[in-house]
Image (cartoon, rainbow, N blue to C red):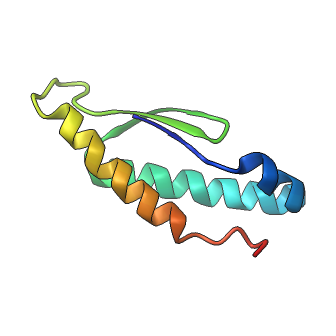
Amino acid sequence: MFVDLVGLTDLSCRLDPEKLREVMRAYSNTVAGEIARLEGHVAKFLGDGVQAYFGWPRASEDAAEQAVRPGLAVATAVSGMSSGAG
C-alpha cells in the first residue's frame, strides 16, 4: 500500500517550516500507527508518502484485504487531523 498526503504543496505555502514539520510528523505517526495496528509493516517513508507491506514477511492469502482496512483507517484518521492553518 502507498499512502500520499493530498494538498501538501498548498499546505507548505500556508505554514511556516516549523509548523509544517510538526504537521508532517503527526501525519507520519498517525499513518504508521494505523498500519501497525492493523498488522502491516511500514517499509519506508518517502517525503509525504508511506509505503507499507501486508502479508510480509510471511505471505497470507488475504494480504490484499489486509491492506484495504488500514487504507480506510488512515483516510479516516488523517481527515480528522488539524493542519493548524484552518
Q: Residue at image x 25%, y 45%? A: 39
Residue 51 left/right relative to 55? right
Q: Nearer the viewer, residue 47 or 86?
A: 86
Q: Residue furthest left?
A: 61
Q: Nearer the viewer, residue 51 or 80?
A: 80
Position of the C terminus by quadrant: bottom right
Position of the N terminus by quadrant: top left
Q: How many numbered callouts?
A: 0
Q: Residue at image x 57%, y 51%? A: 28
Q: In the rendered view, tell whether residue 64 sits above or below residue 25.
A: above
Q: Quadrant of residue 34?
A: bottom left
Q: Residue at image x 64%, y 42%? A: 48
Residue 75 left/right relative to 16? left
Residue 33 left/right relative to 21? left
Residue 26: percent from left, percent from top: 61, 60
Residue 16 left/right relative to 5? right
Residue 43: percent from left, percent from top: 44, 30
Q: Residue at image x 21%, y 30%? A: 55
Q: In the rendered view, tell whether residue 30 sits above or below residue 54.
A: below
Residue 24: percent from left, percent from top: 67, 53
Q: In the rendered view, tell whether residue 59 sits above or below residue 40.
A: above
Residue 11: percent from left, percent from top: 78, 56
